[in-house]
Amino acid sequence: MTAYYDNQTWEALRVYAIEEFGVRRGDLIRDPVFLCETVFREFGASPAEVAAEAVDWRTLTRPEMLRLRRIKNALTLLRPTSDVLPVDEPIHRELSEWLALISGLP
């Protein structure tokens, strides 16, 4: 669990840096495309797979529920990056798909 919380803290710091200092493409900290790609890779599933898991989340085991909750927390952190991602970037569409899941996650 420690690794996840370390990642979440790092993600929050990166979102803060983007909001405060602006986007800087190619920068490991201030590139919103790189941030989103990194977070989505950590999920290890597609938005469709997570949505299917979340349909009956109350019947899942505690670790499965916790995984979905962590995804929700990470997505909530990423919400502000939607405003700074170019609309024509494929990652913007993917982020929109992910953000649409927030209300259905535990």
Image (tube, rainbow, N blue to C red):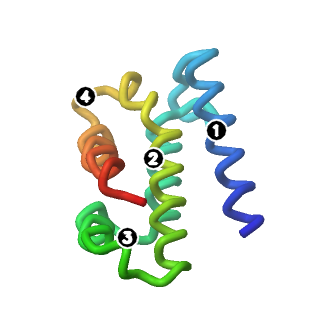
Position in image of residue 13 (x %, y %): 69, 35
Quadrant of residue 46 in the image? Answer: bottom left
Which of the marked residues, 1 or 2, is nearer the chain's N terminus?
1
* Amino acid type, label 3: Ala
SS for callout 1? helix
Q: Is the C terminus in the top left, top right, bottom left or bottom right quadrant?
A: bottom left
Examine the image and state in which quarter residue 9 appears.
top right
Which residue is labeled 2 in the image? 75
Which residue is tagged 3?
Answer: 45
Q: Residue at x 25, y 69 (%)?
A: 55
- Residues under numbered marks 4 and 1 in contact, where contact means CB atoms less than 8 Å apart: no
Circle 4 is placed at which residue position?
87
Farthest residue in the front direction? Answer: 58
Question: Which numbered disc, 2 or 3, marks the residue that appears first in the sequence?
Answer: 3
Decide: few, some or many residues near mark 4? Use Cα within 10 Å; few <14, some 14-19, many ≥20.
few
Whether 98 is drawn above or below 60: the answer is above
Q: Which residue is mark 1?
A: 12
As rendered, which of 31 and 70 lies closer to the eye?
70
Nearer the observer: mark 2 or 3; the answer is: 2
User: Counting residues from the N terminus, which is met first, the one under dot 4 or under dot 3?
Assistant: 3
Pointer 1 and pointer 3: residues touching (CB < 8 Å)?
A: no
Residue type, label 2: Leu
Mark 2 falls on what kind of element? helix
Label 2: how many residues lie within 10 Å, few (<14), some (14-19) or many (20+)? many
Q: Is residue 37 above or below residue 81?
A: below
